[in-house]
Amino acid sequence: KLSINAFDYNCHLDLIKLLRQEGELHKLRRARQKMSELFPLTEEIWLDWLKDEIKMASESSEREKVYELFERAVKDYICPEIWLEYAQYSIGGIGQEGGIEKVRSVFERALTAVGLHVTKGTALWEAYREFENAILETAQPAPGSVPSPEQQQMLCSQLEKIHTLFRRQLGIPLLDMEASYAEYEEWSEDPIPETTIKNYKKALQQLEKCKPYEEALLGAETPKLAEYQAYIDFEMKAGDPARIQLIYERALAENCLVPDLWARYNQYLDRQLKVKELVLSAHDRAVRNCPWTVGLWIRYLLAMERHRVDHGTISEMFEKALNAGFIQATDYVEIWQAFLDYLRRRVDFTQDSSKELEELRSAFARAVEYLKQEVEERFSESGDPSCTIMQNWARVEARLCHNMQKARELWDNIMTKGNAKYANMWLEYYNLERAHGDTQHCRKALHRAVQCTSDYPEHVCEVLLTLERIEGTLEDWDAAVQKTENRLARVNEQRAKAAEKEAALAKQEEEKAEQRKQARAEKKASKKAKKIKVGDKRKADEEDDGEWGQEEEEQPSKRHKGDGDGTSLEEDMEVETGLFGRSGPENPDHPTNQKEKASTSRKDLPKVFHDSSKDSVTVFVSNLSYSMAEPEVKLRELFESCGEVAQIRPVFSNKGAFRGYCYVEFKEEKAALQALGLDRKVVEGRPMFVSPCVDKNKNPDFKVFRYSTTLEKHKLFISGLPFSCTKEELEDVCKAHGNVKDIRLVTNRAGKPKGLAYVEYENEAQASQAVLKMDGLTVKEHVIKVAISNPPLRKLPEKPEAGRAAQFAVPRQIYGARGKGRTQLSMMPRALQRQSNPGAKAENGMVQNSPATSSGSPEEPKKMSNADFAKMLLKK
């Protein structure tokens, strides 16, 4: 696997774990070395590696290699445990020449790095004091002997070192400061100086200010970003650079894959500390942890230039950036532009020709070719549609190199890449000619612009006329006027034709919609007439005194296939339609005798109408099982956890069968909002849909779909999953690559899985890493596809056709981690795509009059019963 993808982080970990179990120490060393070249290693990996190397180190030469390994370890992250291990290991070499001074040097560096760590710094201070106390014990004269002057001087010097360590420590806010102060009082034969006491009290006060932030970190769950940010803000206000640096390092040790945190830290170092070694080290660690973030690479190149790093090193770092695997085509444009800016600043343009200038031109040419070949092949776009790199190249040639001929060639190339129709591109070229060219080429450019521009031709024509008014001859003016008039005449003619065509298409669509509307009305009327005749026959046979035309239950033997309880879809829609302007799915199989009795008892119930004035305290519940017994009781138990329920209004068909949706009215608006949290809760094997109760006629733009339909860089879209894959199984796979906040398995309306899922990570960095590592992974013998979530945008037509989904997809604006071709899957539920009949729009279950009907008559039409409707048909 590593031979295919050397950047597979988890594969490196698995290999190291396997080799350590088998005891292959030499292979293990090579595996760790390889991984450390590609990634910064965590504290645990470094400690395991160091312990293994310490066991094998017996000779002095091998000890030096361990020292070198410690030096590499402390550069990756600021880790108190590694520094403590380093200091303790160096004590083992105290017998060598200069051993004591080396130990003291390590301890001093450790205190500089992590001695201010509020919770872990105390351990280093105590270890340092124990070391100095051990030296003091060895320097004590034998009992009964008189120390020589040299011994006495050495004793005094060693005592002063320990006193100094105590005083330095007591001036720093650390946990258990009181215990350290008490220990100093007990150890010291002299009274503690007033200065030390004053510094100690000041540190105690500062510790009290820090404690809330430390306690927040202890109580928070990983990654603790908000808590660390609050701590950083606190230290920034205090203004101590050492403490600010330490808290940033602590935050990065736990959030090393958060690009924004690295960017803020590097910005602070660049602007405040400005220490070359410190700044460049932080930038290097940033790009090693988050190589996919182009902003970090750009800041690194700028920092290297700022600190005068040699040109070869900067060029080498730029080549590494090109191989970092950015997730967008525009990222490559940005990194190229940053490098070209650096090369341009190296050139001395007072000379006609130089090595630096040739290198700049060569880099411009390579950038254009790279975007055309490498980037376009991967993302199906160059990332630079406006040719900004070529524009900058042309400006450099014109303004700095005074080479207008080359600049004109470049602009010609730009225009051939589809930019000739844009007025702003021509005006950029015109301004360049105006500043560095001549009037003849300005005129030529504007004449071409008038001929080619299609977005703002009037503006280009105006610029041409202005030029001729100021500088042109009469012949030039006449030619410009004729040119612009002809062009604008053609443009107006084209616009008129386009408007006529659009109007014709709109009229054609309206005629088709009207024909479909009439066809549905005729079909509905014929079905009504058929049922009325059946009802009339039964009336004669059974001598029923009920209302003429009232619907009766059909004999089971006379039911049509697929009719369910014998009620047609159109007939049900007259009683009530759901939130989406349509009735629910087909009715279930024939009910049992008990359910027939229950449905018969509901036949005489009044029809359910919703009071729109109570929308704020009502939720619409749909996709319920048709076979649900006593839905009111079942749903009351479910929704009472959200607040006091005022009323539950389940909707039944004319035959008394439950339609699968209802209205739940609460006493308070807060309870209704809380009830929305039950959306997609599984009830009797189906996901229950809970949505706000909104009049779609008054709010046509209202969206029920609660998930984002735009690019989300912290969320993954996974396809190809086995239908048997559970949420827990998928979480086990995903959590190895970062902190998983949420997983959503996509199901149909019946709750059956579709083999798709959305996985939300804490941040963009974790999601990007997961894409690289999980795409193509095999899960239960299924190869899954993983990409950054970027659903295709969809828009509804201005005049939607009745009963037909609006399916006009527009191209995505930004492609995901795998470029074009991934996540091309509709996330919009079909219920949202479907528009209700304009002639019979429903307001959450209430049939409304069509606009055409209402506009045709000033008075509101009288509502008709089934019998009235039947009589009207018989008169015809």
Image: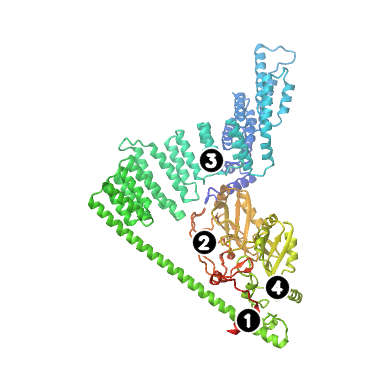
Per the image, the residue denoted by label 2 is 795
Mark 1 vs mark 4: in front: 1
Mark 2 or 1: in front is 1
Observer-side mark, 3 or 1, equals 1
Q: Could you tell me residue 405's position as x and y percent?
A: 29, 46
The answer to whether marks 2 and 4 mark residues whose Cβ atoms lie closer than 8 Å is no
The residue that disc 1 covers is 870
Q: Position of residue 339 (x, y in %)?
A: 43, 42
Give the quadrant of residue 486. Answer: bottom left
Asked if the residue at tag 1 contacts the one at tag 2, i.e. Cβ–Cβ closer than 8 Å, the answer is no
Lower position in the chain sequence, tag 1 or tag 4: 4
The residue that appears at 71% across and 88% down in the rendered structure is 541
Please tell me how crowded label 3 is: few (under 14), some (14-19), or many (20+) other residues with Cα within 10 Å. some
Helix, strand or loop for disc 4: loop
Q: Which mark is residue 263?
A: 3
Q: CA distance from mark 3 to mark 4?
A: 62 Å
